[in-house]
């Protein structure tokens, strides 16, 4: 009698474990084969499933778009920093080359010299100018 009582619970325990594995493996096979899509519950919820799939695709697309936009912002920011530093360098070079002492040094190399006298203002009457223009 003891043998029977011990055998019965063991068989039930042994029977339960393989059934769980079989249902899991059957479910996995159904998902991989695509046969679960033909069930009535899935077919009745197909519009909702398609809506969720569309949301997932749009979310993925939005992620890619955002990533691309962030990369463009970073690239533009680095280009802006580079252009600003180039602008500052060119501006300082221009200011240095426009100084009177620098201009005097540069024209000295060409054989010219700086005038020490201030410029004179020449005034001409309009009548004299017109007379000069009309003469051949």
Image (cartoon, rainbow, N blue to C red):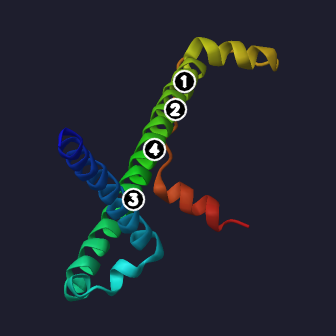
- Which of the marked residues, 3 or 4, is nearer the chain's N terminus? 3
Q: CA distance from mark 2 to mark 1?
A: 11 Å
Answer few, some or many: residues within 10 Å of disc 3's Cα (few below 14, many 20 plus, some between 14 and 19). Answer: few
Q: Which residue is mark 4?
A: 76
Q: How many numbered marks are there?
A: 4
Going by the image, does 129 lie left or right of 11?
right
When the figure is inspected, residue 37 is found, relative to residue 134, above or below; the finding is: below
Question: At numbered mark 1, what does the secondary structure look like: helix, strand or loop?
Answer: helix
Tell me the quarter of the picture where residue 35 sits. Answer: bottom left
- Which of the marked residues, 4 or 2, is nearer the chain's N terminus? 4
- Which of the marked residues, 2 or 3, is nearer the chain's N terminus? 3
Q: Give the image location of residue 119, x and y in percent.
A: 54, 25
The residue at 56%/16% (across/down) is: 100
Answer few, some or many: residues within 10 Å of disc 1's Cα (few below 14, many 20 plus, some between 14 and 19). Answer: few
Tell me the quarter of the picture where residue 106 sits. Answer: top right
The answer to which of 37 and 23 lies nearer the viewer is: 23
Q: Which residue is mark 3?
A: 65
- Which of the marked residues, 4 or 1, is nearer the chain's N terminus? 4
**Residues under numbered marks 4 and 1 in contact, where contact means CB atoms less than 8 Å apart:** no
- Which of the marked residues, 1 or 3, is nearer the chain's N terminus? 3
Q: CA distance from mark 1 to mark 3?
A: 36 Å
Q: Which residue is mark 2?
A: 82
Q: CA distance from mark 3 to mark 4?
A: 16 Å
Between circles 4 and 2, the one closer to the viewer is: 4
Question: At numbered mark 2, what does the secondary structure look like: helix, strand or loop?
Answer: helix
Between circles 1 and 3, the one closer to the viewer is: 3
Which image quadrant: the N terminus? top left
The answer to which of 9 and 131 lies nearer the viewer is: 9
Going by the image, does 81 lie left or right of 57?
right
Residue 105 in view (yes/no): yes
Q: Which residue is mark 1?
A: 89
Question: At numbered mark 3, what does the secondary structure look like: helix, strand or loop?
Answer: helix
């Amino acid at each position: 009698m003891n043998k029977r009582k011990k055998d019965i619970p063991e068989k039930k325990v042994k029977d339960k474990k393989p059934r769980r594995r079989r249902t899991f493996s059957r479910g996995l096979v159904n998902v991989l084969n695509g046969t679960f899509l033909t069930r009535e519950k899935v077919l009745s919820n197909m519009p909702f499933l398609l809506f969720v799939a569309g949301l997932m695709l749009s979310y993925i697309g939005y992620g890619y778009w955002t990533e691309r936009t962030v990369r463009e912002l970073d690239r533009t920011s680095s280009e802006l920093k580079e252009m600003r530093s180039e602008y500052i360098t060119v501006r300082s070079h221009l200011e240095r080359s426009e100084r009177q002492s620098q201009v005097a040094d540069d024209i000295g190399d060409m054989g010219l010299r700086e005038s020490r006298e201030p410029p004179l203002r020449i005034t001409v009457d309009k009548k004299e100018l017109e007379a000069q223009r009309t003469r051949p």
